[in-house]
């Protein structure tokens, strides 16, 4: 090894000291990331979105902002709901088939298993006619579900829905990556869209 | 030399430019079961100068022919064998090791290989490099290993054979080197030095009791069956009757997994898992595995009373060791560990990480709830409280059943169990198991996102690696999604073991054996406490390295009925094996009295 010169300038033999060689076994430097963030680009697509009420056994939460008002007709044969689209057409159907088109709010809802669906809830009658306790209690439950986990169960003798809340469940719901509302409707209803009188459901109802 | 060969050599010299010496080597040695190896010869070739040393027994000298300092890289195949020879010769360990076996395993882990597997011949075949005739190699290997080479092969024959391996390595190196992650390969090489230390040390065994066991085992098997089967009634002679076992299970109210054809699942792994939930099953499990697998004469114990066998480092997909079940005292029959006993003047200690896999999952995923649960000291109780199953002031004593459910859920998740398997394990309907798993998902949401990302990364990139680059390649056929999900935790646990082994052995601790998430060490009584502290420190540092600064707890309990610090003349005992051990020893004693 070289001798340090008399001037004490820290140099060995007039040359600047060599930097210490990096430790080839520096475990921190050798470590590779284990967060697997490259897979963060993987997204779960919401490609199935039922339109239904919550079952009596499941606890649900409602998204605070994602909802929309739609005009629906129910096919009583299988209880499936169809969207009626276009203001002039809705008006025409209302005139042709009074009472069949119902305006409902579709609330984006999720249960504790992370399954999403659209919960259709009837709006109050625009003409101010008194609404049933069924509709009122269901709408109240949907609003409450924005902030609290709850379940709704039909109470036949009461003529309304019983609401059971779960105040101890503090975890917030895990919402999927949300696309536009139109996209959600397309996913939920797919081909169940009525835009003219030629639709088989309308023809059935008009007796054609 | 052809141009192609020259370019290959230049590429090697370039990549290994920092090393003044590049030594490719192989040693041949005699190795009786349990004994330390006795070198017969070694061939060492330095690639820069082309100098070759062919050394036969008697001419080895006090020093190796080349530097073992940081200026030299030593290259061989499954190098713990070479370092065993170095230890036998009293040579210093090389500081820089490139093991082409570990690197071949890393390159092909999860992928199909040739019929030769990960042997040197297999690697040569994989890269289509000509090698030695396998039959000739096996014959030579057997003769040298068993010490019967005298009269069959000359010194020159053996040296030529040894040099053939060196030549093979010389051909393999330039083919493999471009894709070798050198810094991490050298870390893996350093572990092979540590592995050779553990293989060299071996586990101290109570030889007189082993001898008695070996002599009496054949005779006492029938009595053992009768003795243990008294509580079960499932044996007919030496045959296990599954129909009687089914009746016993019904009587005891123990649910048992079934195969697709409806028969009871009688795999040892199933027994092992079920014995954890239903300790009553444990003696039967021990009996079955002992009768079927315990070949006491296969337990490799040397003349110095040490159990030694090759640890088979990096053999498992996760990078874990895979020593022979029959040769290694830490095999599946846990009662046989009662043979582990320190020699006079010595003590042994079993030092383990606390809830290692849970801790790794917590810290690698960064899940705050999981970290809190780990740090509580009782992750099962903590999970119960976090999930709302156990009140905040609940304890292990006041909420034993709930804690047990949480424990089974956590362990089940670690094993990748679905709701149906968990339901069997906890003896509850599937809906209960489903709810437990849902609570786990909800409580440790960040862990599950991280786990999902790990699986997605593996499937997207066809590869997944650990903190220090141990890699699983996806593409060699069906991959069990559960094992993929478990991979980051299991494989990083193996990394942690390796780092701890390196640190402890290099700091002078006599590490006898690695045991999944623990180490057995041995020390003279006046040094035992200090060495335990060194081992603990090494394990803590290893956890810090793998977990990016976080530390796992390390235990080594001295108290209780089954202490982990044992001083001569006491023996080691695994709680799960005590019933079987006592019964066997009692039968032996009875046999001796009769004799």
Image (cartoon, coloured by chain):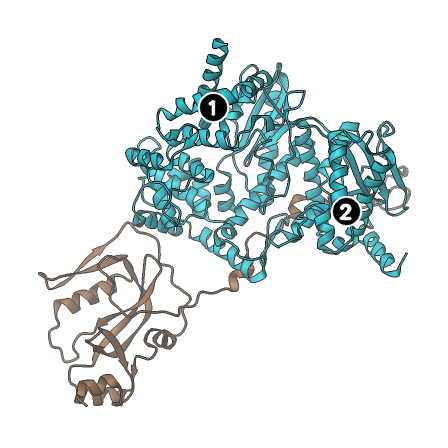
Q: Nearer the viewer, residue B209 or B419?
A: B209
Q: Is the residue at mark 1 from the same chain as the one at mark 2?
A: yes
Count residues near mark 1 (Cα–Cα under 10 Å), then give few for <14, some for 14-19, many for 20+: some
The chain letter corresponding to brown is A
Earlier-in-chain disc, 1 versus 2: 2
Residue B109 position within the rendered picture, expressed as x and y whole percent measured from the top left: 62, 51
B501 to the left or right of A110: right
Which chain letter goes with mark 2? B
Q: Residue furthest front?
A: B237
- Place residue A131 in its image quadrant: bottom left
Residue A197 position within the rendered picture, expressed as x and y whole percent measured from the top left: 25, 90
Q: Which mark is residue B133?
A: 2
Instruction: State whether residue B62 is above or below residue A77.
Output: above
Residue at x-position 52% and y-position 64%: A41
Residue at x-position 70% and y-position 47%: B185
Instruction: State whether residue A112 is above or below residue B89.
Output: below
Instruction: State whether residue B138 is above or below residue A150.
Output: above
Alpha-carbon distance for marks 1 and 2? Answer: 44 Å
Q: Nearer the viewer, residue A208 or B288?
A: B288
Residue B242 position within the rendered picture, expressed as x and y whole percent measured from the top left: 37, 37
Task: Report helix, strand or loop for mark 1.
Answer: helix
Residue B21 position within the rendered picture, expressed as x and y whole percent measured from the top left: 85, 44
Name the residue carrying label 1: B221
**Residue B399, visible in the rendered structure:** no
Residue at x-position 67% and y-position 31%: B199
Q: Which mark is residue B105?
A: none
Q: Specify the colour of chain B.
A: cyan
């Amino acid at each position: 090894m070289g001798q340090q010169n008399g001037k004490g300038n820290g140099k060995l033999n007039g040359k600047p000291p060599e930097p210490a060689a990096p430790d080839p076994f520096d475990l921190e430097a050798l470590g590779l990331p284990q967060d697997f963030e490259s897979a963060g680009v993987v997204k779960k697509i919401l490609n199935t979105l039922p339109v239904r009420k919550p079952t009596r056994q499941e606890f649900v939460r409602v998204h605070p902002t994602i909802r929309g008002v739609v005009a629906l007709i129910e096919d009583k044969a299988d209880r499936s709901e169809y969207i009626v689209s276009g203001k002039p057409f809705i008006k025409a159907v209302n005139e042709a088939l009074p009472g069949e088109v119902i305006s409902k709010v579709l609330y984006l809802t999720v249960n504790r298993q992370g399954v999403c669906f659209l919960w259709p809830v009837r709006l109050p009658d625009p003409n101010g006619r008194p609404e049933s306790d069924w509709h009122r209690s269901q709408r109240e439950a949907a609003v409450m579900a924005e902030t609290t986990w709850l379940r709704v169960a039909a109470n036949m003798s009461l003529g309304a829905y019983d609401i059971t809340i779960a105040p101890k469940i503090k975890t917030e719901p895990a919402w999927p990556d949300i696309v536009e509302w139109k996209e959600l409707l397309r996913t939920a209803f797919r081909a169940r869209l009525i835009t003219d009188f030629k639709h088989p459901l309308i023809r059935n109802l008009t007796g054609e | 030399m052809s141009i192609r060969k020259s370019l290959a050599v230049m590429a090697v010299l370039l990549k290994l430019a920092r090393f003044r010496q590049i030594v490719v080597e192989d040693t041949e040695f005699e190795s009786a079961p349990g004994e330390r190896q006795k070198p017969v010869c070694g061939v060492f070739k330095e690639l820069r100068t082309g100098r070759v040393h062919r050394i036969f027994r008697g001419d080895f000298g006090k020093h190796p022919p080349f530097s073992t300092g940081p200026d030299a890289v030593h290259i061989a195949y499954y190098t713990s064998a070479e370092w065993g020879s170095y230890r036998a010769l009293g040579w210093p360990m090389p500081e820089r090791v490139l093991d082409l076996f570990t690197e071949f395993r890393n390159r092909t882990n999860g992928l199909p290989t040739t019929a030769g597997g990960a042997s040197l011949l297999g690697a040569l075949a994989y890269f289509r490099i000509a090698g030695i005739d396998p039959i000739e190699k096996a014959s030579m290997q057997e003769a040298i290993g068993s010490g019967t080479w005298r009269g069959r092969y000359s010194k020159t024959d053996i040296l030529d054979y040894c040099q053939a391996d060196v030549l093979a390595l010389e051909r393999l190196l330039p083919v493999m080197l471009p894709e070798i992650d050198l810094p991490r390969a050298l870390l893996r090489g350093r572990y092979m030095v540590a592995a050779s230390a553990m293989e060299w040390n071996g586990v101290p065994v109570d030889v007189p009791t082993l001898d008695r066991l070996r002599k009496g085992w054949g005779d006492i098997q029938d009595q053992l069956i009768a003795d243990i089967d008294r509580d079960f009634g499932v044996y007919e002679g030496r045959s296990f009757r599954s129909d009687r076992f089914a009746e016993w299970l019904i009587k005891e109210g123990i649910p048992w997994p079934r195969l697709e054809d409806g028969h009871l699942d009688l795999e040892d792994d199933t027994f092992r898992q079920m014995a954890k939930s239903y300790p009553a099953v444990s003696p039967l499990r021990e009996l079955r595995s002992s009768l079927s697998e315990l070949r006491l004469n296969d337990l490799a114990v040397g003349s110095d009373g040490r159990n030694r066998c090759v640890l088979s480092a990096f053999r498992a997909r996760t990078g874990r060791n895979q020593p022979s079940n029959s040769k290694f005292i830490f095999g599946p029959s846990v009662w046989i560990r009662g043979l582990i006993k320190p020699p006079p003047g010595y003590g042994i200690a079993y030092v383990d990480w606390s809830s290692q896999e849970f801790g790794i999952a917590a810290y690698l995923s960064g899940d705050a709830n999981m970290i809190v649960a780990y740090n509580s000291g009782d992750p099962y109780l903590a999970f119960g409280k976090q999930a709302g199953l156990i009140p905040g002031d609940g304890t292990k004593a006041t909420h034993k059943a709930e804690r047990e459910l949480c424990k089974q859920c956590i362990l089940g998740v670690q094993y990748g169990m679905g709701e149906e398997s968990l339901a069997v394990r906890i003896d509850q309907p599937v809906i209960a198991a489903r709810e437990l798993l849902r609570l786990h998902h909800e409580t440790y949401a960040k862990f599950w996102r991280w786990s999902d990302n790990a699986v997605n990364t593996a499937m997207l990139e066809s590869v997944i690696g650990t903190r220090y680059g141990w890699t699983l390649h996806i593409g060699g056929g069906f991959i069990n999604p559960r094992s993929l999900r478990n991979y980051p935790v299991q494989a990083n646990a193996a990394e942690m073991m390796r780092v701890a082994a390196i640190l402890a052995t290099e700091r002078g601790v006599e590490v006898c054996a690695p045991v999944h998430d623990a180490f057995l060490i041995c020390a003279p009584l006046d040094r035992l406490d200090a060495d335990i502290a060194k081992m603990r420190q090494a394990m803590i540092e290893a956890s810090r390295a793998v977990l990016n600064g976080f530390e796992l707890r390390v235990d080594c309990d001295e108290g209780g009925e089954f202490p982990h610090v044992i001083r001569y003349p006491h023996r080691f005992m695994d709680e799960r094996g005590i019933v079987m051990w006592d019964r066997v020893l009692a039968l032996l004693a009875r046999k001796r009295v009769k004799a």
